[in-house]
């Protein structure tokens, strides 16, 4: 085929103790959207980091327009038109939007001085081209995650690449932002740009891609035209077995009220006098799954983090645990009272990336293992082993540094960390974000088991099918307010969207 512009041949990549890629073949054509899919840890990000010059040590060859290339760094790859938007955000949080976009290619004035005026002007132009309502001088860490992700995308696009790699770009975007991104990708393709697109979201893959390559355990399973695949056949290629129904039938019987939240409000973190959560009232029963739906930014995360004691100074209202009024002044206190919180953003709250899998998992159960002074090490290892097996976390051993796990496996470690604490009330914020479809169905089965054993669960999720299929009741939030609460049996995707966008 003559329109193949880039080809990777027999790529092998070893990390200490792990063979991440074992003879992968991959090619892209001009102006196509090529989806790269596979389970967590299959090697997608690693392959793309080789293509974009992040990893420079590997075996095998890369050909660009028929000519063999070897990059010494990302700068080399960018020079020949290959840019990547990383799975994990890669912005410098203390710098401004403009500084981040121009990092490494800052406009200079009089030879040496950085031309801030020009930088802000250029940034403003870029932002408006993408209809992004962000101040170029705003410091990155003050922006919500979705906006940060959009800035990353703008930054990569501003490099005018010929091959643009998106590694799970939509996992932190709102529906609206994601749709906007698809429009951007569309126009890039029209300009002749080739897009490599990594995602675990099936609908997206089928909507966007021209061709799909599947990786499994570091090897290429195959490349297909999208129209030659169905949802089921693709899943089968990815996981190597049939998965017919990913949602288990849950037979829980909610009991007494365990948590009651009354007139609950939370101050807006940035805008004084404004509330990000307003007058929320609900009850959670023993063994119940209470879903919370709503658009991103509707206050869902702030509500649950605040109940968990994250911002005691900024919240008001009453919380009752088992009928007793409690003043939850810190996450530590919440944990002592039998609560657990799996956060949506693994970098910020979920994990200590430089510690091992084992240490991260046992952080929340230190007390439990501390009592067993002598057998501590052994006990700890036992618990960790159990959850690595249970969640099928892909790691060479317990002492592996979390930072070196694939994104989805990091998410599983967070889950393991909280499950090992055996909470009675478990709060999950986007529990399956970035998780492959096989592991998703495992997590759903764990949720089923937990609630049937009497654990009460609050689950915030943007995946409507997940909320609909697992919850007993669903709270729908809109702009900080609880728009309604309905039994899941009465809910449909359309109904949820109606309330989530402010409908009565
Ligand atoms: N810096 C590193 N050091 C050691 N091992 C690594 C490193 N980066 C990745 N790995 C390992 O390589 C394998 C492939 O990881 P990779 O991140 O490419 O998976 P992925 O397909 O992107 O998964 P996900 O869908 O979870 O993002 C995993 O087993 C991972 O633990
Ligand atoms: Mg990845």
Image (spheres, rainbow, N blue to C red):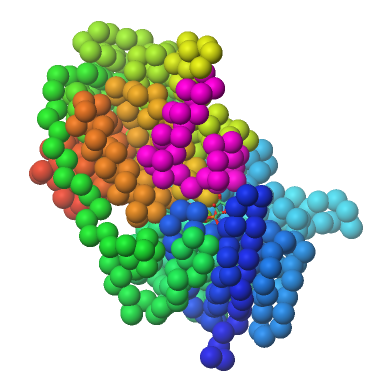
In this rendering, does residue 42 appear at all?
A: yes
Q: Position of residue 387 (x, y in %)?
A: 41, 35
Q: Is residue 401 magenta?
A: yes
Which is the main secondary structure of the residues drawn in magenta? helix
Left/right of residue 201 with respect to residue 46 in the rendered view = left
- Residue positioned most to the right: 111
Q: Nearer the viewer, residue 399 or 101?
A: 399
Name the one closer to the observer, 391 or 175.
391
Q: Say how many tags the image has.
A: 0
Q: Is residue 440 magenta?
A: no
Residue 169 appears in view:
no
Residue 105 in the image: x percent, y percent?
75, 58
User: Who's the residue at 57% across and 91% down the image?
Assistant: 2
- Span of residues in magenta: 376-405
Q: Nearer the viewer, residue 164 or 453?
A: 453
Give the quarter of the image for residue 109.
bottom right
* Relative side of 126 to 239, left or right: right
Q: Residue at x 67, y 72 (%)?
A: 60
**Above-or-below relation of 258 to 59:** above
Q: Position of residue 346 (x, y in %)?
A: 50, 38
């Amino acid at each position: 085929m003559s329109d193949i512009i880039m080809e990777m041949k027999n790529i092998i990549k070893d990390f200490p103790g792990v063979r991440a890629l074992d003879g992968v073949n991959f090619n892209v054509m001009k102006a196509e959207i090529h989806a790269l899919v596979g389970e967590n840890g299959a090697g997608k990000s690693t392959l793309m980091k080789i293509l974009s010059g992040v990893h420079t040590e590997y075996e095998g060859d890369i050909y660009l327009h028929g000519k063999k290339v070897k990059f010494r760094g990302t700068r080399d790859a960018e020079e020949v038109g290959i840019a990547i938007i990383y799975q994990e955000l890669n912005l410098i949080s203390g710098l401004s939007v403009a500084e981040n976009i121009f990092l490494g290619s800052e406009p200079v004035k009089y030879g040496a001085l950085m031309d801030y005026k020009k930088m802000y002007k250029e940034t403003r132009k870029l932002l408006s081209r993408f209809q992004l309502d962000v101040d170029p001088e705003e410091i990155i860490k003050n922006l919500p995650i979705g906006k940060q992700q959009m800035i990353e995308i703008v930054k990569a696009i501003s490099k005018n690449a010929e091959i643009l790699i998106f590694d799970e770009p939509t996992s932190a975007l709102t529906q609206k932002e994601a749709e906007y991104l698809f429009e951007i990708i569309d126009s890039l393709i029209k300009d002749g740009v080739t897009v490599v697109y990594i995602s675990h979201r099936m609908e997206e893959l089928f909507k966007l891609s021209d061709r799909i390559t599947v990786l499994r355990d570091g090897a290429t399973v195959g490349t297909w035209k999208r129209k030659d695949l169905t949802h089921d056949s693709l899943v089968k290629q990815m996981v190597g077995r049939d998965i017919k129904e990913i949602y288990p039938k849950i037979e829980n019987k909610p009991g007494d009220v365990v948590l009651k939240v009354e007139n609950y409000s939370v101050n807006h973190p940035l805008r004084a006098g404004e509330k990000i959560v307003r007058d929320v009232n609900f009850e959670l029963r023993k063994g119940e799954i209470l879903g919370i739906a709503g658009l991103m930014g509707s206050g869902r995360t702030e509500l649950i983090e605040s109940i968990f004691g994250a911002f005691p100074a900024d919240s008001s209202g009453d919380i009752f645990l088992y009928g007793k009024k409690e003043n939850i002044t810190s996450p530590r206190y919440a944990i002592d009272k039998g609560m657990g919180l799996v956060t949506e953003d693994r970098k910020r709250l979920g994990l200590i990336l430089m510690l091992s899998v084992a240490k991260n998992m046992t952080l929340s159960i230190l007390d439990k293992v501390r009592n067993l002074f002598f057998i501590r090490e052994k006990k700890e290892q036992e618990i960790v082993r159990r959850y690595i097996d249970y969640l099928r976390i892909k790691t060479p051993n317990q002492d592996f540094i979390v930072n070196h796990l694939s994104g989805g496996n990091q998410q599983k470690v967070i889950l393991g960390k909280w499950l090992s604490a055996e909470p009675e009330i478990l709060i999950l914020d986007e529990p399956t974000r970035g998780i492959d479809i096989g592991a998703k169905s495992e997590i759903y089965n764990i949720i089923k088991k937990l609630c049937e054993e009497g654990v009460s669960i609050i689950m915030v999720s943007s995946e409507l099918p997940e909320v609909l299929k697992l919850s007993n009741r669903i709270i729908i939030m809109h702009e900080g307010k609880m728009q309604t609460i309905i039994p899941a049996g009465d809910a449909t995707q359309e109904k949820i969207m109606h309330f989530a966008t402010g409908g009565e």
